[in-house]
Amino acid sequence: MQNKSLKIKFGNNDLILETGRIAKQANGSVTVTYGGTVVLVTACMSREIREGQDFFPLTVEYQEKTYAAGRIPGGFFKREGRPSESEILTSRLIDRPIRPLFPEGLFNEVQVMAIVLSSDGENDPDILALSGASVALSISNIPFNGPLAACRVARINNEFVLNPTYAEMESSDLEVVVTGNASGVLMLESKANEVSEEIYFEAVKFGMDSLKPILSVQEEFCRLYGQPKAQVELKLVDPALMQKIGSLSREKLNKVYKLSKKEEREEEIDLLTKELEAQLTGEGFLAADIQAGLHEVEKKQVRRMVAEENIRIDGRSFKEIRPISCEVSVLPRTHGSGLFTRGQTQSLAITTLGTGEDEQLVEALEGERKKSFMLHYNFPSFSVGETKPVRGPGRREIGHGALAEKALLAVMPSKEKFPYTVRVVSEILESNGSSSMASVCAAALSLMDAGVPIKEAVGGVALGLVKEGKKEVILTDIAGLEDHFGDMDFKVAGTRSGVTAVQLDLKINGISLELLKECLEQSKEARLFILDKISSALSAPRQELSSFAPRIDVIKINTEKIGELIGPGGKNIKAIIAATGASIDINDDGTVLVGSTDAAKSEAAIKMIKAIAEDVEVGRIYSGKVKRIMPFGVFVEIAPRKEGLVHVSELSATFVKKVDDVVKVGDEFKVKVIGVDELGRINLSKKQAEQSS
């Protein structure tokens, strides 16, 4: 079999593209190899357009198989189940840059599938899957304006590193996935530890420069092994219908766009649609085509207003942010809450503090890890005045939550400083533009209200773009229609000190680095304005936690005592938890975290832990329980697996003739340690304990 492959040096390893060996029935298929990581990417397109189809049905599925890392899945069924959050986020990472490169009017169903076949535990397969999607589509007969390429850039010790390994990423203060093509930047996905806009821009530029040889090798690969593109029907609106709709609706649309409220505009558009349908269906036009035509007329009208008349729909200037209000402590029983409203977008964020038992265990190809900070985003249908069935979180919810989580991760305290598991939930109560950035702002308020000692408040803003010919207009704080009809959704979050998260999505074929730099500068100005609004509501984290939050006490024990504290089969630690109701986490370094909302329960648990973990101290008084009675005295347990003898002469200040007369098995009382012999046997005194008190 002919070897259809090309190889190029890309960072620390060779990047190998190969086709024609496996998955040959797909329209396009390619394997991408980097180090010991191999990803198969396929692209398929339906032959026919589904009846009534009125949008482009693109789906992207990314799957990580555990066999790739030499493991068998956990659970009862021992096979992969529903996609993990990581797989969903990578599916979105692939979808976002390839979607704008399909021709307008393509309504055939297209599916891209990426399967990780082998993982070396060092190189993240997501970048390979993204570039592989470009190659699979480009060599297929599917109409696609490729190629594009992707890389990951990290900053480690003030140096940019291309395609860092998992281990290298641990010491980075900036991570950015850069996707681009010959026209410019296509997509960005980033997290950072408060880096400046200048450093961030240089990282993107470094990534774009690194992509040039990868784009060249893809072009060569397509020239050698690509297929001719299929001739497919593109469903475009009839120009004659567009002209009719334009003449009938342009004046009314001008009035509609002067309405300040989203729901008022939507109501008027619905009425206008019905009027057009009543008038034009009689001329032989279909209702679906009339709706599509009005949508295009709206789009042109909104863009013309911005590009030619310098007018936004709601009358704002290009850099103006909608009215903002910030509130904290809006809920009485939660650990912390914040309500952030910007125009008609509103997020209610609630913070819950938990213990180590509440950490999330994440199973990934590179291994298991625990998360002590989580941010979850919910988007109920009432937030946009609609009705729909309530299901689990969709890809959009998971993606928006992950972006907000990245934005706040840089300011979260270390586990040593704040030994809590923290969960923030953002409930979107209203939506008209950038609810993910509203979630960042509301979450910062909520965390500070809960007393979480974050380094600084974090704010976020979304910028849009209208590009008509050579004119490029950047819009700060885009509303829903500006996002829908515009060319860009550029979200930037950060503190006063720097950027913490960036996400860029486009509907056009790339933007220049010069325009990106301008967007970063404009976003900083907006972010500082929003941070001022947040500070006016709450300028710093509260000094005290909510009375409803658990208190976590930290104690240190000798590491040699960990086994004794846990006990055989966890017997000792389970007994303490059962007796006190406190939660207990033990780290390998001897750190013990004791959590409870009741201070008395925490104190009781700490005493029991110390009784086991600390050496018995002569002269110290312990609470003990009678376990056995002998003629010469009683054996009292002062800690699990620690018993001492109270001789009959030490039971009472008065003469005791018979031990059974004064104590019974199960009695509890205080005892004083009066001696420990060379064999470790403990001698106790009830009499002296009573005299000491």
Image (tube, rainbow, N blue to C red):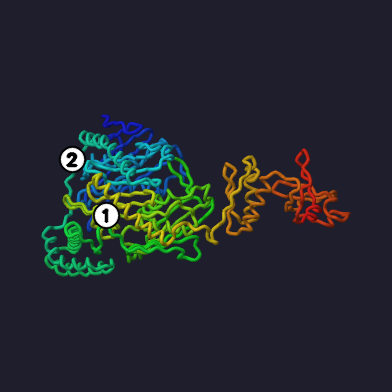
Q: Residue 404's spot in the image, x, y percent? A: 39, 53
Q: Amino acid at mark 1?
A: Gly
Q: How far apart are labels 1 and 2 at the CA level?
A: 36 Å
Does the image show residue 388?
no
Q: Amino acid at mark 2?
A: Pro
Residue, x 14% and y 69% (percent of image)?
279
For the residue labelled by badge 1, is the local secondary structure a helix, a strand or a loop?
Answer: strand
Marks counted in the figure total 2
Q: Residue 87's spot in the image, x, y percent? A: 38, 47
Question: Could you say which quadrant of the image residue 121 lies in?
Answer: top left
Q: Nearer the viewer, residue 250 or 225?
A: 250
Q: Which mark is residue 549?
A: none
Q: Nearer the viewer, residue 189 or 46?
A: 189
Q: Residue 344's spot in the image, x, y percent? A: 32, 64
Residue position for label 2: 228
Quadrant where the N terminus sits is: top left
Residue position for label 1: 464
